[in-house]
Amino acid sequence: MTEVQNVVIIGSGPAGYTAAIYTARANLKPIMISGLQPGGQLTITTDVENYPGYENPIQGPWLMEQMKKQSENVGTKVISNMVTSIDLNSKIKKLTLDDGSEINTKSVIISTGAQARWLNAKNEDKLKGFGISACATCDGFFFKDKIVAVVGGGNSAAEEALFLTNFAAKVFLIHRKDKLRSEKILQDRLIKNPKIEFLWNKKVEEYLGDKNLSSVLLSDTLTEEKMELNIDGLFVAIGHDPATEIFKGKLEMDNEGYIITKPDSTQTNVIGVFAAGDVKDKIYRQAVTAAGMGCMAALEVEKYISEDS
Ligand code: NDP
């Protein structure tokens, strides 16, 4: 493509598709590069019950398929490829794709998202979405009066464990050390909560269950002693990694690799480059908040392009 595009959207989660819908409806003819995991994190969840507009639970992959079709119906060109490098040094940005082709564009919306870290224990892939989750806000509700576990020792694990006590009958907090790294105030709340039981110095070796998770095999990190723990659900909360590798050294990021944007804006430190969704948000991480930021990015692109021409 030799012509200069108005806007290229990198990444196809809720932030990217929302940005696509808005920029397409503003006649900007957006190009979306959909990436390695088209649809993003929602394609590995099952029931979605907290995205507004649907009376009954919907399936994550179906929701993303609908967003794709909606964005295409209003004029987005979706290219199934990966951006391998990006040159942000001039006013016109240059993107190189995996097949060697290049795209020149006036503006870029980065919505490459983040990926939950997983334990990589035996059977994890098989039971993901069937009792194993990385998002208590998304899936906690399905474990009303059940027994669940959270793995991790940071703020996310602490918050997820506390959140799950709203539904579950019991919440085990499994950590590989004998102390948490989460904020003291959260630790105090965990200790005070009668539904929470700590399992210190424990590592998940294997997930057990035929169709759904029924138990986990734990080993003690000090004694190597094994124990089986019967649970209905397990939430992995050991951190996320934003997908920002190709932007390193080119955009301002925090020490965990999340892109920094101006307050109340999706504008990065490079003019004409915007970031929306989990790639810049490690606090909320919801489809609906990502979609909201995608809308913000699109409106900011529209303003940038109209002021520029
Ligand atoms: P963190 O990196 O803070 O914590 C990750 C936890 O997972 C650590 O306890 C770590 O153990 C454990 N862990 C890592 N890898 C493994 C593994 N392979 N097996 C078992 N355990 C593992 O991640 P968070 O997601 O909790 O937080 C990320 C950032 O977001 C932090 O800066 C946090 O403060 C922030 N945050 C803030 C919130 C708030 O302000 N309300 C809410 C949520 C997050 P170990 O301790 O042994 O290293």
Image (tube, helix red, strand yellow):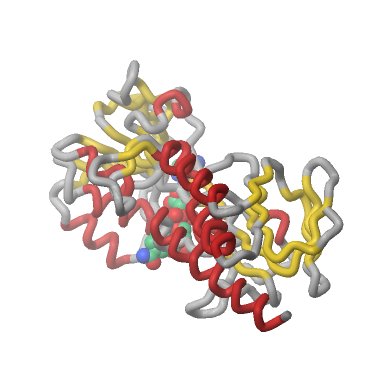
Eyeballing the image, is 265 above or below 111? below
* Residue 287 in sight in this render: yes
Q: Is residue 145 left or right of residue 274?
A: left
Across and down, in percent, residue 209 comes to 33, 19
Q: Nearer the viewer, residue 53 or 129?
A: 53
Quadrant position of residue 197:
top left
Across and down, in percent, residue 128 comes to 41, 31
In the rendered image, which quarter contains the C terminus? bottom right
The structure residue drawn at horizontal position 67% and vertical position 54%, both measured from the top left corner, is 31
Q: Residue furthest bottom?
A: 307
Across and down, in percent, residue 145 comes to 14, 38
Eyeballing the image, is 301 above or below 277? below
Quadrant position of residue 246:
bottom right
The structure residue drawn at horizontal position 65% and vertical position 58%, both measured from the top left corner, is 30
Q: Nearer the viewer, residue 158 or 1?
A: 1
Q: Is residue 111 left or right of residue 123?
A: right
Q: Residue furthest top?
A: 210
The structure residue drawn at horizontal position 31% and vertical position 66%, both measured from the top left corner, is 184
Q: Is residue 182 left or right of residue 163?
A: right
